[in-house]
Amino acid sequence: MNNSLIKTFTGLRGNPRACVYTEPLWGLSMNLCFPFASVYMLALGMNDSQVGLVATIFMVSQVLFAFISGPVTDKMGRRKATAVFDFIAWSIPCLIWWRAEGFWFFFAAALLSGSMKITQNSWECLLIEDAEKDQITGIYSLVIVFGQLCGLLAPIASILVSRLTLVPAVKILYLNAFVLMTAKVVILYIFSRETQRGVIRMEETREKSLVTLAAGYIGILRIIGRSPGTIFALALSILSSIVAMLNSTFWQVIVNKKLLVPEPFLPLFAALKSVVAIIFLFYLAPRLTKEYFKLPLLTAFACFFIGQILLISAPVQGFLKYPVLCVSIIFDGFGSGALTMLTASLIALNANPEERARVMALLYMIIMAVSSPFGWIGGLLSDLSRNLPFVLNLCFLAAGFYITVIFFSKKQPEKQPGKTN
């Protein structure tokens, strides 16, 4: 019980506990589908460019919903907005993916699923607004850990695919995702309460329209512009978002179509990545983030970079490709797990607490707006060569490393965990 993450877990109360304890339902639903998402689209007759276009549509939809996520979260309240838009963003699309027959099904699901930017905002406010500040990094780590733990059940998906073939098996997984995500929505709503700040903002915005509230973004931009730490967190989040999108969209494609790894094996690699991420979050993250963010950020970018290099250099023929892929996933797991936790923590720690919903809404809108073209760009690159989306990732990871070095070289040593202002 000496591990700080375990102490955080056992010490959770109220909304943070409700949010964290229901998070495994996300992993048991969506995480079982993700390893097959791109190859499922290809199996239904789509090409690489269309797969990339769907990713871009998803990102553009997120931009639009991110724009209104702050006002919606303030007017509806964190708790109600989370319940309503979790159902719209995940439960309904799961039914569409279950019945999908071609591009336009995925187009429609991507448009709806973009509303997850509202629930991301409202859910994160519900998660952290009533939590102690020194718990925030640990809370985000726990959220990621629960998602990754459920990834260990990926062999179930492998068995389904090997027994039923790809398309019927994935349809079952999406139906399962609908049931569990809907259960998550209901359980979280029952066991959570509106945050203290949420009650205040609901009262303050009661007589204001969404248009009026959205017009206030000019003032929010000034708040963001006065915070070097927020700008730094925004820059890293943009780079991390692009890298994550390209990696999650085209990893299955390069492994299955270029390296010719059989489809039932794909979830096994996802399970290995989950193991690595869990090890990082439990045993290394508490030590690395105890005083500074600099070292874990540089380590994350470097590990992810090495993982991508190994992926594109893996041999197509022979058994050697499997150990190379495993080593690549180990580096990817450390890198992606760290970047996800660190960038989310940086944004939460640096967001103005009085305007948290609108600050985070604007930040997420900017992140999605900048990231959105890269799904389509990645698809075009993948049509030329399955390596090229990952070559692009190498450029972004190198940029993130450089920005981190520059930022910390121009500021005084941090005096509090995670403080970057």
Image: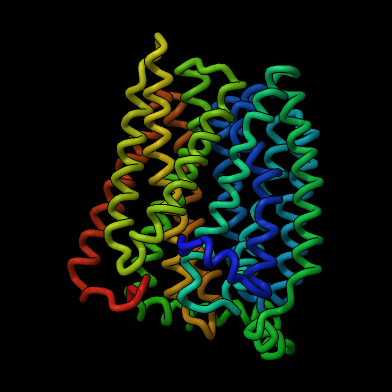
Tell me if residue 9 can be seen. yes
Judge from the rendering whether residue 402 lies leftward or rightward of residue 387; answer left or right.
Answer: left
Which residue occupies 45% across, 53% down? 281
Residue 44 appears at what percent x and percent y? 69, 24
Looking at the image, is 81 positioned above or below residue 377?
below
Residue 250 appears at what percent x and percent y? 49, 32
Looking at the image, is 195 positioned above or below residue 338?
below
Residue 382 appears at what percent x and percent y? 45, 28
Question: For the view shown, which residue lies furthest in the front direction?
Answer: 1
Which residue occupies 60% across, 77% down? 214
Judge from the rendering whether residue 229 lies leftward or rightward of residue 341; answer left or right.
Answer: left
Count of labels shown?
Answer: 0
The image quarter containing residue 187 is bottom right
Judge from the rendering whether residue 46 lies leftward or rightward of residue 247; answer left or right.
Answer: right
Looking at the image, is 289 positioned above or below residue 398?
below
Which residue occupies 28% across, 53% down? 298
Tell me if residue 376 can be seen. no
Looking at the image, is 391 positioned above or below residue 298?
above
Which residue occupies 49% across, 65% down? 138
- 129, 268: nearer the viewer: 268
Residue 363 appears at what percent x and percent y? 48, 67
Judge from the rendering whether residue 322 lies leftward or rightward of residue 132; answer left or right.
Answer: left
- Which quarter shows the C terminus? bottom left
The image quarter containing residue 346 is bottom left
